[in-house]
Image (cartoon, rainbow, N blue to C red):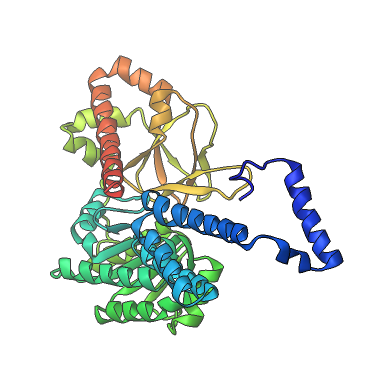
Amino acid sequence: MNMKFSARTRLTGLFAAGVCLLALGVGTDFISLFPKFILGGFLMFLGLTFLYEWVYKTWFKLPKADYLIIILILVVIATVGFLEGVTVGILAAVILFAINYSQVDVIKHALTGATFQSTIARPRMHERILQRYGKQVLILELQGYIFFGTANHLLEQIRIHIHRYANTRLCYLLLDFSQVTGIDSSVALSFRKMYQLVEMNNASIVLSGLSAEIMSFLRKSIFINLDETSFHISADLDHGVEWCEDKLLESTGVLGRDTEKSIQDQLKDLGGDAKLILRILHYLEKQELPAGVKIIHQGDSPGDLYFLEDGIVTVQLETSNEQPRRLNTLSSEHLVGELGFYLGSKRDASVLTGAPPPLLRLTAESLKMMEMEEPEAAALFHKFVAHIMAGKLSHLMSTVETLMR
């Protein structure tokens, strides 16, 4: 009220303190000498000011749901009491918050194994099988805080997926919790129903990105034994998707089969004859390396180009304060180090051999000699490299397009 009367000096505060001090020293009898109509006018002015600011002006500022809560508080205070109005307002605000937050989609991305795959660069036959049968894998990236409102939406999304792909049995449900901030105990029933729904389809549940708190909640509150064979726990989303892919390929019988194409077969598919292919192989050096050897070091100058005939290698990003993070795992039929080799840039990541792989190495000097001595063979080799890089780019664009939907 003093601010509205432009009483903005220190004298205002000193005067108010003086009145309180006087009441403390001589009592409050002197207040009866103050004209009541002036005090009533002040109170009426203050009350009308509150009504103007909170009933009229907030109509233009607040969402309608929040405005209705203010009107509700006003009505309860006027008819029942002040404390009751505050209590009703708090309860109404909590209910409104729960309703609004439940409308936030707890599912950041809903994907299938056909549209989203792990960083494992598999043989082309494996990729075709995963695209064909990938709808048997449902991948749900979760986010935010999960409580009874959002948990029920999650359950409905699983039902919708099963209904949409009625001709394709759901075999694996992957729930990624890496972006989940917490779980409320009220979701126990919804999670139990979700488990029963998945169990009816004889499917497995994969949980990834679990924090210690969420893991403890799942074990104690949902009455589900996470140690059962129908559950699998992965450190992160990528390893969880990889596990689902391995199980899917294993069920089709191709995981352990020799499905890889040699470099000779791939060059032949691109139109190369036997003599031209042999001339290309003349410039490639075969290397047999044990597991755990770094063939490319992060930060090094551009070196050699490798073709992986068999086995696997892991591309990893190394930082000084953290453990190396896997960027990609390459199996047979893939090139290693082609970007730095062709662009002449420093290596962005390290490459570590996994299962002992036979490698075919091409140095920059050998490529120059091939271009000078065998231009036709060099043209076929460049076409071969472009074909592999185009396949990688196509897979990357497909993944980006899926995540942007």
| In the image: residue 274, left or right of residue 4 | left
Instruction: Name the quadrant containing residue 43.
Output: bottom right
Percent coordinates x, y for residue 213 in the rendering:
55, 70
Q: Is residue 352 above or below residue 136?
A: above
x 46%, y 71%: residue? 78
x 24%, y 56%: residue? 114
Percent coordinates x, y for residue 131 in the rendering:
21, 55
Q: Is residue 383 above or below residue 47?
A: above
Residue 230 visible in the picture? yes
Residue with the most extreme top position:
372
Percent coordinates x, y for residue 388 in the rendering:
28, 37
Percent coordinates x, y for residue 118 in the rendering:
35, 53
Residue with the most extreme left position:
167
| In the image: residue 103, left or right of residue 264 | right
| In the image: residue 217, left or right of residue 150 | right
Residue with the most extreme right position:
25
**Disc count in the image?**
0
x 46%, y 79%: residue? 227
x 48%, y 56%: residue? 48
Q: Is residue 347 above or below residue 14?
A: above
Residue 165 visible in the picture? no
**Camera-side residue of 61 and 168:** 61
Instruction: Name the quadrant containing residue 251.
Output: bottom left
**Camera-side residue of 342 and 324:** 324
**Camera-side residue of 233 and 259:** 233
